[in-house]
Image (cartoon, rainbow, N blue to C red):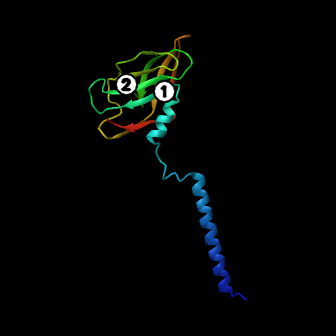
């Protein structure tokens, strides 16, 4: 025969086990957001490689020398486009290679005249990129703004 103190102790142990299991389930369902705050450079690059106008091989430098920073753009559309402007955040980047015409599937490396968003070598950047382009078949203008930032290390 169990005593009242033994029954209440067993009840508290079972209650504690249920609470721990519930917390573990909640943690798994929410994905432990404290551990995954940022987007990794690999995830960002994978996202940007599948965008309408793909950004591949970003080489962003902290140097103020024109043309030191470069990005490779690829046309993932099924029509010829002319890329007119690239923006990192709210800043329009002066570039030495735009406007650039791209056939479907074609890639071009564009030299940038500014080091935005890099300020120091070895630092990291995470910036929303917007690309303004025109469908040359009907002269329609489009702006693709990424839903994920372009992320990497400044050179």
Q: Which residue is mark 2?
A: 93
SS state under label 1: strand
Snapshot quadrant of residue 22? bottom right
Q: Where residue 114 sits in the image (x, y, percent)? A: 32, 26
Q: Is residue 20 above or below residue 33?
A: below
Real-space Cα distance between discs 2 and 1?
Answer: 17 Å
Element on which disc 2 rests: loop
Q: How many marks?
A: 2
**Label 2 Cα neighbours within 10 Å, binned few <14 / some 14-19 / many ≥20:** some
Q: Which residue is mark 1?
A: 54
In the depicted structure, whether residue 1 falls above or below residue 100: below
Direction right: furthest residue: 1
- Nearest the camera: 18 or 58? 58
Left or right position of 89 against 25: left
Nearer-the-camera pick, 57 or 6:
57
Q: Find residue 96 and report its horizontal and vertical position in percent.
A: 34, 19
Image quarter in which the C terminus is found: top left
Where residue 76 sits in the image (x, y, percent)?
A: 53, 23
Q: Is residue 76 left or right of residue 96?
A: right
Q: Residue at x 29, y 38 (%)?
A: 121
Q: Residue at x 56, y 51 (%)?
A: 31
* Residue 89: image tag: none
Q: Residues within 10 Å of mark 1 (few under 14, many from 20)?
A: many
Point out the tag, 2 or 1, that comes first from the N-terminus. Answer: 1
Marks 2,1: beta carbons within 8 A? no
């Amino acid at each position: 025969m169990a005593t009242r103190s033994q029954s209440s102790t067993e009840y508290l142990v079972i209650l504690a086990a249920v609470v721990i299991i519930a917390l573990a389930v909640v943690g798994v369902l929410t994905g432990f957001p404290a551990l995954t705050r940022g987007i990794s450079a690999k995830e960002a690059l994978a996202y940007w490689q599948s965008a309408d106008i793909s950004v591949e091989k970003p080489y962003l430098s902290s140097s103020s020398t024109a043309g030191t920073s470069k990005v490779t753009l690829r046309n993932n559309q099924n029509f010829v486009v002319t890329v007119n402007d690239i923006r990192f955040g709210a800043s329009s980047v002066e570039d030495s290679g735009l406007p650039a015409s791209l056939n479907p599937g074609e890639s071009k490396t564009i030299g940038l005249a500014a080091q935005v968003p890099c300020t120091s070598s070895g630092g990291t950047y995470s910036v929303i990129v917007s690309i303004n382009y025109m469908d040359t078949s009907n002269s329609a203008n489009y702006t693709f703004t990424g839903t994920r930032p372009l992320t990497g290390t400044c050179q």
